[in-house]
Each structure stands twice: as structure tokens, then as C-alpha cells.
Image (cartoon, rainbow, N blue to C red):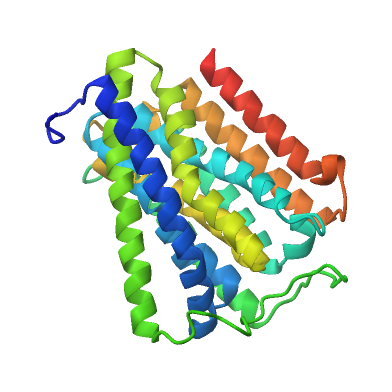
Amino acid sequence: MPDLFATPWPLGTSVAVFAIAGILTVVASIRLVGLGDTLADRTGWGEALFGAVFFGLATSLSGIVMTAVTAAAEQPQLAYSNAVGGIAAQTTALVVADAFYRRVNLEHASASLSNLLFGCLLIALLALALLATFTPDVTVAGIHPVSLVMVGCYLGGISLVRRSDATPMWNAVDTSETRTDVPQQQDPLERHSTRALWAQFTGVGVAVAAAGWAVGTAAEGIVEVTGLRAGFVGGVLMGLVNALPETVTAVAAVRRGALTLAVAAILGGNCLDALNLVIGDVAFGGGSLYHAAGADELFVTAAGLFMTAVVLSGMLVRQSRGWGRLGFEGVLLLGSYAAIVAVLAT
């Protein structure tokens, strides 16, 4: 019986833990969908804002823990690539969710001011992370100043989204296929009290976080034993597991009819994954995490910017039917992610 507290783990243990933690993440994420949809109605926050903040936080817990664990273990490139790799994989998850909604292109049906603003916020956060690499390599109390700017940008963005929801100056044109955020008429969770729902939501979030610790520790073992590049393990392998909660919840939300929640969970989760870089910067004891990033990590960050711009374009153009029944943005996202994997694997 291997000692799970003695790291790095042997390759067999690392692979087994990696797989089991991924399965746990999927099961927990399915439960989060129903709880999140009901709480969005109970709190009055709506699917977009609740999905991007609370739902995004719950589904991002595994990625947050992965980044913190690997940064604290002096694996800055693994920590950085996990955060930005998760963003790339999660953005591609929109294509998976779209495939389960056959009525019309998902971006057409779920276009909203809130989702557009969250996409803009994500672009701003990723741009700040890239800009940090061009600033002096200095830290204050072990934190690079750009980390504080990113936190302020996120909080300001959330405030902007809330104000825009209250007094919108722009609205998507309603079509026969537009799906607005309306409370479920027959919700099986309605009989539970709000306190009980929050307790379940928190408990599932803790389970997702525990899975994140396991994946992060397993990834350290995989890198050390196999000699694989940190950019590939973090950006692809960890990124895919990091994206599992958002992918599963997006598909489940689409099947439940909560389209706004599906898109908001991914875009909001991506914003929080960008803030994972702040978590990694705090946990990393060797200076600025941004300056420890290599060419692979910066490449995936730039790719995340491009993919987010593609998603925003899809919500603005709003094709009813497009290339391969997915819309032009779906095909571009699949091609972009395939290219990312190919570059990191070579």
C-alpha cells in the first residue's frame, strides 16, 4: 500500500489516482447542475451571474487546488499551464455542450449581455497575465503587483455585470430559438430548504477540491517519473481534468434546458481559472509565477485569448446553423484546441 503523503508517487499510483479523481469530479459536477439551477432561482441572481460566480467557483475548485499544490511544490510551469490549459479545454467544452443541443447553435440560443461581458472580462484577465511577463520581475510580500491588479479587475468586472443586468443598455434580439433564464416550473429540488441546498452545494464543492489536490499531486509524479514536459502535462492532461467539471455541468445544464447557466458556468469558470494564476503566484515561493512561465505556457495563454474572441464572435453573429451543425465558432474552437495539443506534444 503506497504512502499517499510521500511524494512524488510511483507512476502506477499517479495514473490510478489521476483517473479516479477525474471520475469523482464528473459525478460531483452532475450533482452541482441541479443545485446550481435551483439556487440561481432562489437567490434571484439568475443563471448568468450565479453560474459565473458561485457555479464557476465550485467547478473551478479542483483547478484552484491543482495550481496551488503544484506551485507550492516548486513546479511553477506546471501550475501556470494547468490554469491556462484548463481555460483552453473548458472553452472547447462549449462545442461538446453544443453537440447535445440539436435545436439550434448554442451561442445563438444563449446570447446575453452578461455572457458577453464575462467573455470580455476573461480577455482582460488573460491580457494582464501576458503583460505581467513584460514587467520587472519584482514581488511585494511574495506577490507580483499584477496579481493584485487581476483581482481588482475581476471584482470590478463582476460589479459591472451586476449593474448591467439591472439596467441593460444592450439586449440580444429575441428569436424563436432564444432561451431566456426562467425558473423551473417543476423542480424536484424545490422541496429542500435554501439552507439545505447551500449545504449540499458546499459539500459537493469540497469533494471537487479534494479531487483537485489528488490530480495536482499525481501530475507532479507523472512529470518527475516520465520526464514529460510540464507544459504538456499541465496544459493538456491536467487541463482536461480541470475542464471536466465545466464540461459535465455544461452538458447537463443544456439537457436540463438551462442554456444560460451552461455558457455562464464555462466563461465564469474560465475567469476564475485566470485568477488561479494569482493563487499560484501566492503559493510559489521562488518569485513571480508570471516570469517563471516558459514558451509553452505563454503560447497557451495567447491561444486562450484567441479562443475567447471566437466565442464572443459566435454570440454576436448568432448563427442558427453553421459549419457541421456547430456554427463557425465550434469548428474553430475544435481546430484551435487540436492545434494546441499538437504543439505541446511535439
Q: Foreground: 74 or 183?
A: 183
- Residue 138 lies in quadrant: top left
Q: Residue at x 40, y 34 (%)?
A: 80
Q: Residue at x 35, y 34 (%)?
A: 18
Q: Foreground: 124 or 199?
A: 199
| The C terminus, quarter of image | top right
Say if residue 67 shows up in the picture. no
Direction from residue 114 to residue 90 in the image, left or right? left
Compared with residue 331, is residue 30 higher up or lower down, i.e. above or below? below
Q: Residue at x 43, y 54 (%)?
A: 27
Compared with residue 108, is residue 84 higher up or lower down, i.e. above or below? above
Direction from residue 126 to residue 108 in the image, left or right? right
| The N terminus, quarter of image | top left
> In this figure, what is the number of numbered marks?
0
The location of residue 253, given as percent across then percent down, is 60, 63
Q: Foreground: 290 or 197?
A: 197
The location of residue 183, given as percent across then percent down, is 62, 82
The location of residue 312, given as percent across then percent down, is 72, 52
Compared with residue 319, is residue 288 higher up or lower down, i.e. above or below? above
The location of residue 297, given as percent across then percent down, is 47, 28
Direction from residue 161 to residue 53 in the image, left or right? left
Q: Residue at x 84, y 73 (%)?
A: 174
Say if residue 274 shows up in the picture. yes
- Residue 44 lies in quadrant: bottom right
